[in-house]
Image (cartoon, rainbow, N blue to C red):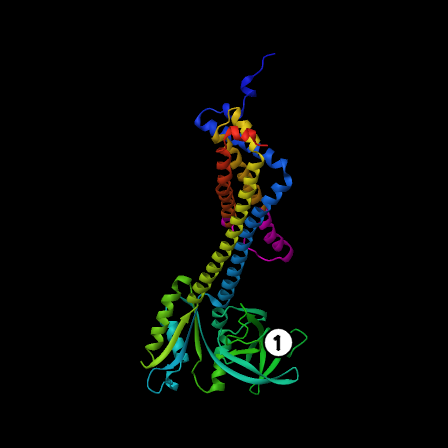
Amino acid sequence: MQVDLQKQSPWWTRCHGPVFGFWCRLREALGFAFDALRANKVRTGLTALGMVIGTGSVILVTTIALTSRDYVLSQIEGVGSNMIYAHLEGDDSVSGSGSISDALTLQDLAAIRQSVPHLSAVAAIILGRDRLMLDHIERDVALIGTDADFRTVRNLKILQGRFLDAEDVARRNKVCTVTEKLAKTLFPDGWAEGRLVKVHGLEFTIIGVFKEGAQTFGQSEITQETIILPISVMTYFTGTDAVDQIYASADHPSNVVAATKAIGAAIRSRHRPSAVYRVENLTEILAAAGNIAMALTLVLLLISAIALIISGIGIMNIMLVTVSERTHEIGLKMAVGAGRRAIRWQFLSEALVLSIVGGSVGIVMGVSVPLAVRYFADLRIPISGLSILIAFLVSCVVGVVFGMIPAERASRLNPTEALRHE
């Protein structure tokens, strides 16, 4: 029977050619690596566990950072990402206080609507207060006089009925909309539309119930107990056409800055040069929130990277122990013709297999957590594909870098001395 010596010869003597030789060596080295790792399953599992935790941490940290960033930005955008607001700050003269003539007025509102382009909505507000019996206790309630555009610029959500319209303002209709909490307090049965509420001794019909698009927790002019009236009715109570603040909403985020400057110019052109008006937008707040979220993400990623590096050190230590335990085996392979490159490939491939397997399991665990939250809690948790790719590549790099030292040490063993080792 003829024996095929080519098939029985060691793998390092059968690989010829630059391309075929590379893939042949890699395939054979990976085969030996899997056999060696299966021989000691407990050690392999514990070594790979560090890589699993490190890789999963990278994905989870990125997911948490993205979720936090999206939540913060959505809260700001819920208030109105394109929103611009203007109000009288004071007077830069010696007295330092603005006069009544410096106050913003309904005429300023009309001028902004006519002269400033790229605005989707403009509204003014007049603030006031009244006392109502709530839960058998007389309490202060916030009053806001405004018009239909206020719903757009402040991103209000209508829960019942409707919001104020142009006809309500023009005819000075005695109608109002109330916040969700105030409606529940006034009418515990849950339905407020069409009911009556007294404001400054006059009966107003509730035409709608609303809430803010994003909670400001009483830090804006809208409190939890607020009544919104037509601005024409509010001027009847105040006896003047002065307004406390003017809101505007740009038609596109790219026009916010230009519209802010145009609104400021339109207001200042109608008042004394010494009057100081603040015209601002949320662009800087959004940018600051984005920068803070990015900084937090980088810090958390660095912490995860440390975990991966520690895992790599663990792989290196285990591989160094493995080299010591398999010194006799290495000497045998060198004695039958294995070169230093072949030995180096074998131990490097073991470290690479540990990092790839551990990284893959870590990716599965890191992705499964936000997916489980999505499924069971019905929350939108973003998963970054880039973080998955980076985590996998980093785990591979860690395996190669920390596997080089044991692999190099194994390849430099003296064959004679290695054969004598027991």
Q: Nearer the viewer, residue 378 or 39?
A: 39
Residue at 35% x, 70% y: name it.
262
Can see residue 173?
no
- Residue 196: image quadrant is bottom right
Whether residue 241 is situated above or below residue 216 in the rendered picture? below
Q: Quadrant of the C terminus?
A: top right
**The N terminus lies in quadrant:** top right
Q: Main secondary structure of the magenta part?
A: helix
Look at mark 1 in the image and give the residue it sits on: 183
Left-right relation of 286 to 197: left
Circle 1: residue type: Ala
> Can you say whether 239 is above or below 412 in the image?
below
Q: Secondary structure at mark 1?
A: helix
Q: Is residue 152 above or below residue 356?
A: below
Tell me where residue 78 appears, x and y as whole percent: 51, 66
Which contiguous range is marked in magenta?
Answer: 362-386
Residue that protrudes farthest toward the right in the picture: 189
User: In the image, what residue occupies the spot 35% across and 87% down?
Assistant: 95
Q: Position of residue 318 (x, y in %)?
A: 57, 42
Which of the 4 image quarters holds residue 285? bottom left
Q: In x, y percent, where is residue 116?
A: 36, 70
User: Which one is nearer the viewer's eye here, 133 or 115?
Assistant: 133
Residue at (55%, 27%) from the top-left corner? Answer: 332
Q: Is residue 131 visible?
A: yes
